[in-house]
Image (cartoon, rainbow, N blue to C red):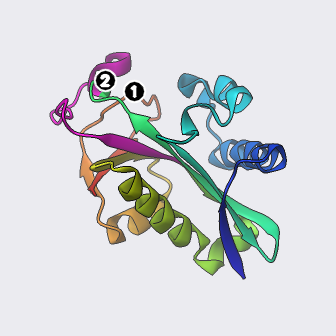
Amino acid sequence: MVEILYATTPQQIATLRELFLEYQHWLGVDLCFQSFEAELAALPGEYAPPTGRLLLALYDAQPAGCVALRRLAPDVASCSGASSDRPLPPSESACEMKRLFVRPQFQSLKIGRLLAERIIAEARAIGYHTMRLDTLPVMTRAHALYAALGFQQIPPYRHNPVPGAIYMELNL
């Protein structure tokens, strides 16, 4: 049985930190360009309520996956030298889905979809109008999931040094 909960206790945050590290290892990409070590040290950091969320998925009480949500500033399109043909209007409230990860032994159980659907629902409940994300070209199953959930590919809105990084957006 899958249970998705808010990661708020010190134990849950520690579990999330482990999952984030597993995610980085699984990606095989150094996430220093995202200040990953500082992010881990500061958890929940910018993922804290009221504008963010950290969700932990348990399968039969075992940590199976996670996803995070944070506010995305309207001017992020100019962040880190990246440019976009679609900057967000100042009046639009936007967020970013981050760190969607399911441990390999749980990946056949649709937990990734459950986490993505839940974080989208959380974003709507907070009042965001737009959700963005970036993903890597090798993550073809993730691309299919995002497309099935209604995400559309967009120009880069922030810097990602990985060649072929894909940027997506969902109108909430």
Of all residues, the one furthest to the bottom in this rendering is 1
Tell me if I can see residue 171 in this picture.
yes
Q: Which residue is mark 2?
A: 82
Is residue 90 within the magenta segment? Answer: yes
| Residue 136 vertical position relative to residue 118 in the rendered view, above or below | above
Q: Position of residue 32 (x, y in %)?
A: 61, 24
Horizontally, residue 108 falls left or right of residue 92, namely right
**Secondary structure state at the residue bearing disc 2:** loop
Residue 149 lies in what quarter of the image?
Answer: bottom left
Q: CA gap, disc 1 to disc 2?
A: 5 Å
Q: Quadrant of the N terminus?
A: bottom right
**Start and end of the magenta stretch?**
77-98
Q: What is the secondary structure assignment of the residue under circle 1?
A: loop
Would residue 156 appear left or right of 106 to someone viewing this image? left
Q: Is residue 171 left or right of residue 44?
A: left
For the C terminus, which image quadrant?
bottom left
**Image spot of residue 141 (x, y percent):** 48, 66
N-term mark: 1 or 2? 2
Q: Circle 1 is placed at which residue position? A: 159
Q: Residue at x 64, y 79 (%)?
A: 109
Give the class, few, some or many, for how many residues have Cα within 10 Å of label 1's Cα (few <14, many ≥20). Answer: some
Q: Is residue 43 magenta?
A: no
| Closer to the camera in the image, 52 or 163 | 52
